Image (spheres, rainbow, N blue to C red):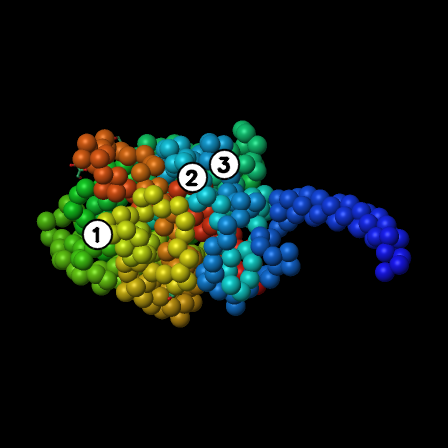
Amino acid sequence: MANKPQGVTWASSVTGSFHSLVALLIAVLVVSSLYLSRDRPWLGSPTPTMPTRECDLFSGRWVYDDASHPLYEEKRCPYKSSEITCDAHGRKDTKYQKWRWQPHGCDLPRFNATAFLEKLRNKRLVYVGDSLNRGQWHSLVCMVEPAIPAGFKSMSRPRNASLRFFTAHEYNATIEFYWAPLLVESNCDDPQNHSGHHRIARVRSIENHAKHWRDADFLIFNTYLWWRLPEMELLWGSFESPAAMHKVVKMPRAYEMALNTWSDWLEAHVNRSKTKLFFATMSPSHENAKEWGGIPGQSCYGETEPITREGYRGTGSVLAMMRVVERVIKKLETRGVTVHVLNITQLSEYRKDAHPAINRKYWHPLTKEQLANPVSYADCFHWCLPGLPDVWNELLYTYIFHILDT
Ligand SMILES: *[C@@H]1O[C@H](CO)[C@@H](O)[C@H](O)[C@H]1NC(C)=O
Ligand SMILES: *[C@@H]1O[C@H](CO)[C@@H](O)[C@H](O)[C@H]1NC(C)=O
Ligand SMILES: *[C@@H]1O[C@H](CO)[C@@H](O)[C@H](O)[C@H]1NC(C)=O
Ligand SMILES: *[C@@H]1O[C@H](CO)[C@@H](O)[C@H](O)[C@H]1NC(C)=O
Ligand SMILES: *[C@@H]1O[C@H](CO)[C@@H](O)[C@H](O)[C@H]1NC(C)=O
Ligand SMILES: *[C@@H]1O[C@H](CO)[C@@H](O)[C@H](O)[C@H]1NC(C)=O
């Protein structure tokens, strides 16, 4: 105790320099972590676990991470969707853009647009399906286009064509979308004028669609929402023919018949050593807040946080239809055709915050009654961009880079 003053002096000078050392170290860490989070090829942990076939990419949790997401700025993307850009349509909170998906068993690589474009050189990547798949297409275009200088990229702008495409000219690569909401032919195939009429599916016919994408290198299919009905009218023969046969078939049987037509076509026509096939499972909706413990009568309108209860599932996804997808894809595998499942259902179930609700473009003027009650016209089916579909594309990217070639 006698030498306390001396000790204090020594200690304070040491702690003094120790403090400045710590401060310096913290500064270095902060700066380098900012730097690293921009440039390191992995999201998540500093010692990433590479994704492999064994890792279930679709089982995990959402982590708020505004250093890694969003992957692009809505207003900078010249090819964005005019419908689901929620910022542009007045959404005030942006938290929904800043979540990354963390699988339990491994980490996702950071999306690298240049590397992806290299992979697509001299290739066609085509999304085929409904408006949810179209959202994912818009998302991928906005994810890659910042890596291409002006003048070296373009977007086809046909008014009413089923096929739309983005071209990266230097790479001779296209990222396309083909409108076929039921995959098989139907009376909803007009890309402009399809809602509002009684749905009829030509359940055995797909060739008029498929001829547009049979030689693609990557095909990403989806179909679900348009089948979410108790039953559907099916047609054998053409719409014009008086001899055509009509029959109303219950779900999920009608859905299975259509997916069998799709899988038979793939088996007969796809070049297995060239074309990589993907199927995105059902995209869930959030129409009834009661399901996640919210206020009865409310919907996704006003929601700003994901659901945290692991395994949450709402009534927006129909398990019987998931079973159909499983069966059809498994059967196809036994016939030598592999379709990779982008199993986005569970991870999207959590994202009640990620829908446009009322912050989207409406094609018809809203009535006074609707405006007085936002829940009545809130869109709890589609997803804002930037947002959830970007993560679906990160999963596709992970497949293309880390799973297909291993
Ligand atoms: C992205 O990919 C390109 C091409 O493979 C590579 O040169 C570049 O270093 C990558 N960038 C990052 C941040 O990993
Ligand atoms: C461009 O890509 C297409 C396939 O999408 C291919 O058929 C064509 O040969 C390529 N052109 C050049 C100049 O490599
Ligand atoms: C697009 O519209 C034109 C003129 O209205 C029509 O002739 C053509 O068949 C339509 N194309 C498609 C793919 O619907
Ligand atoms: C849209 O389709 C319906 C039903 O096929 C048809 O009656 C209507 O005239 C079409 N509208 C336009 C603008 O083409
Ligand atoms: C299938 O694709 C491979 C790789 O692109 C090609 O070499 C082969 O000629 C194709 N086969 C047929 C039948 O087109
Ligand atoms: C998708 O994942 C769920 C679990 O979240 C699983 O039950 C289902 O079988 C998977 N679907 C397919 C088509 O593999």
Looking at this view, is 41 or 265 the one in front? 41
Of the pair 395 and 3, the residue shown nearer to us: 3
Q: Quadrant of residue 107?
A: bottom right
Which secondary structure lies at badge 3? Answer: loop
Q: Are marks 2 and 1 in contact (CB under 8 Å)?
A: no
Q: Which residue is mark 2?
A: 93
Q: Is residue 161 above or below residue 24?
A: above
Against 161, residue 267 (above or below) is below
Q: Identity of the amino acid at label 3?
A: Glu
Q: Position of residue 99 (x, y in %)?
A: 48, 49
Mark seen at residue 134: none
Q: Secondary structure at mark 2?
A: loop
Asked whether 379 or 226 is in front, the reply is 379
Q: Amino acid at mark 1?
A: Ala
Q: CA distance from mark 2 to mark 1?
A: 40 Å
Q: Which mark is residue 73?
A: 3
Q: Nearer the viewer, residue 357 or 208?
A: 357
> Where in the figure is residue 49, as x and y percent of width and height?
60, 62
Q: Nearer the viewer, mark 2 or mark 1?
A: 2
| Residue for point 58% across, 52% down | 43
First in sequence: mark 2 vs mark 1: 2
Which residue corresponds to the image point at 28% horizontal and 60% vertical from the top-left? 318
Mark 2–mark 3 Cα distance, whole angstroms, equals: 14 Å
Q: Quadrant of the N terminus?
A: bottom right
Farthest residue to the front: give it. 2
Q: Is mark 3 within 8 Å of ligand 1?
A: no
Tell me which residue sits at (46%, 46%) in the image.
390
| Residue type of the residue flagged with mark 2 | Asp
Residue matched to label 1:
201
